[in-house]
Amino acid sequence: KQEVTQIPAALSVPEGENLVLNCSFTDSAIYNLQWFRQDPGKGLTSLLLIQSSQREQTSGRLNASLDKSSGRSTLYIAASQPGDSATYLCAVMKTSGSRLTFGEGTQLTVNP
Amino acid sequence: NAGVMQNPRHLVRRRGQEARLRCSPMKGHSHVYWYRQLPEEGLKFMVYLQKENIIDESGMPKERFSAEFPKEGPSILRIQQVVRGDSAAYFCASSLQGDYGYTFGSGTRLTVV
């Protein structure tokens, strides 16, 4: 059974800092991995999708890497801003179109 | 191009009533997924549907919960005889196919009083 763990559970940083969020998964046989952002009381916004054959994806200040063999992914946020404050969720998909297994999330606070 | 539409956004039901949650996937998406987020917990898979078919319902509670995705109209998650423990945020997601990832709706927040 796939288990996804995210560390740290919460993180508070000053504005402008670069930061790394970690995600690990127990079964390396994944199809893809997706990072989401969830604002309080809101839905999920997809940030980055990495296929199992890819090593990383970038979008603006965000960079996500995937090391499938070791069961790890990181989300790097450059030059953090208060608007980045949210919960960040990592989710893995085992086969095409199948369910996502989510981590518990990292709650990020960026202080002005 | 509207995203995944869920309604209602908030739903209050008394214990024993029925709750009906609706989800309209993105245009052209034929895969629909329902997830539940209990207070202070992560998202848990409930059911995966395609038009007129339940593909995977292994995350659905055995009793009181059902889901459908008819040929026409939205997907419906139905909870019969709700109990306080059903209070949660229910999210629907749709996908063109698994390769392209999911798009989530804003969720329905169910409160059972």
Image (cartoon, coloured by chain):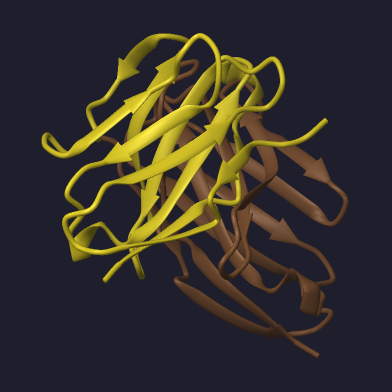
Q: Position of residue A75 (x, y in %)?
A: 65, 54
Q: Which chain is brown?
A: A
Can residue A101 be seen in the rendering of this structure?
no
Can residue A76 be seen in the rendering of this structure?
yes
In the image, B31 versus A35, the foreground residue is B31
Q: Residue furthest bottom?
A: A112
Identify the residue at horizontal 60%, vertical 61% (top origin): A42
Horizontal relation, residue B27 to residue B44: left or right: right
Where the N terminus of chain B falls, by quadrant?
A: top right
Residue A39 to residue A30: above or below: below
Q: Quadrant of residue A43?
A: bottom right
Q: Position of residue B80 (x, y in %)?
A: 21, 43
Identify the residue at horizontal 37%, vertical 49% (top origin): B36
Q: Quadrant of residue B9?
A: bottom right
Q: Position of residue A41 (x, y in %)?
A: 56, 67
Horizontal relation, residue B76 to residue A61: left or right: left
Q: Which chain is yellow?
A: B
Q: Residue furthest right?
A: A60
In the image, A86 versus B1, the foreground residue is B1
Identify the residue at horizontal 61%, vertical 20% (top origin): A53
Q: Position of residue B98 (x, y in %)?
A: 56, 19
In the image, A11 versus B107, the foreground residue is B107
Residue B49 to residue B35: above or below: above
Identify the residue at horizontal 49%, vertical 32% (top origin): A68
Residue B94 to residue A76: above or below: above
